[in-house]
Image (cartoon, rainbow, N blue to C red):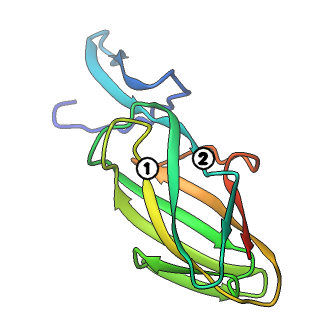
Amino acid sequence: PGNSQTQARVRFAGGTGGVERDTLRVADSCGRVLLLPLQARVVSGVVALPDTVALASNEESELPILLANRKGVERGMEAEVRVKIGNATLVEVLSPLASETIQQQDGLWLRYRTTIPSEDSKDALLRLRVRGLLGNATTTTVRVDSAVVGGVVLSTPSYAATTHYRVL
């Protein structure tokens, strides 16, 4: 009937990156066919950190968080990165300021909201300015727990998203 409505949920399963386009064919009970263009953005990438960083107590350094093997990622897209510091008595994050900081028994959790600065995967998604502290141990880990770009949760394999800090 005229002015009637219906809802449909379309499930999209994958793609290789970029914008995927297709057409949805909807037939009504009268045999009329409506063609609806569909468009879905496929975003992918792998978060990566340097393997090891050595710092002297009170020495400052930069920790780039990279987004490698990017597909469908564009400059200006919103991103959120959640970082865990295993032993925060060894490493202090000076900048940027986290949008959320939670101290838990298993470490310090930091959440950063940012935008993609460049389409070049050699440009860091986020750069943390850190300082080595005396602490109560000699090493700690800085790990990217999760990364979301354009609303899509990206892969953070443990081997590629952990940096081991050694304070000298």
Residue beneath disc 2: 48
Amino acid at pointer 2? Ala
Residue beneath disc 1: 124
Q: Residue at x 38, y 37 (%)?
A: 73
122 vs 36: above or below: below
Q: Earlier in the sequence, mark 2 or mark 1?
A: 2
Disc 1, SS = loop
Crowding at dot 2, Cα within 10 Å, few <14 / some 14-19 / many 20+, comes out as many
93 vs 152: above or below: below
Depth order, front residue of 46/27: 46
Q: Residue at x 41, y 55 (%)?
A: 79
Disc 2, SS = strand
Say whether residue 82 is left or right of residue 99.
Answer: right
Say whether residue 142 is left or right of residue 14.
Answer: right
Depth order, front residue of 164/31: 164
The quarter of the picture where the N terminus appears is top left
Amino acid at pointer 1? Ala
Depth order, front residue of 24/88: 88
In space, the residues marked 2 and 1 are separated at their CA atoms by 10 Å
Residue 58's spot in the image, x, y percent?
A: 58, 85
Residue 47's spot in the image, x, y percent?
A: 58, 46
107 vs 147: above or below: below
Looking at the image, the residue that sits furthest to the right is 137
Residue 99's spot in the image, x, y percent?
A: 42, 77
Crowding at dot 1, Cα within 10 Å, few <14 / some 14-19 / many 20+, comes out as many
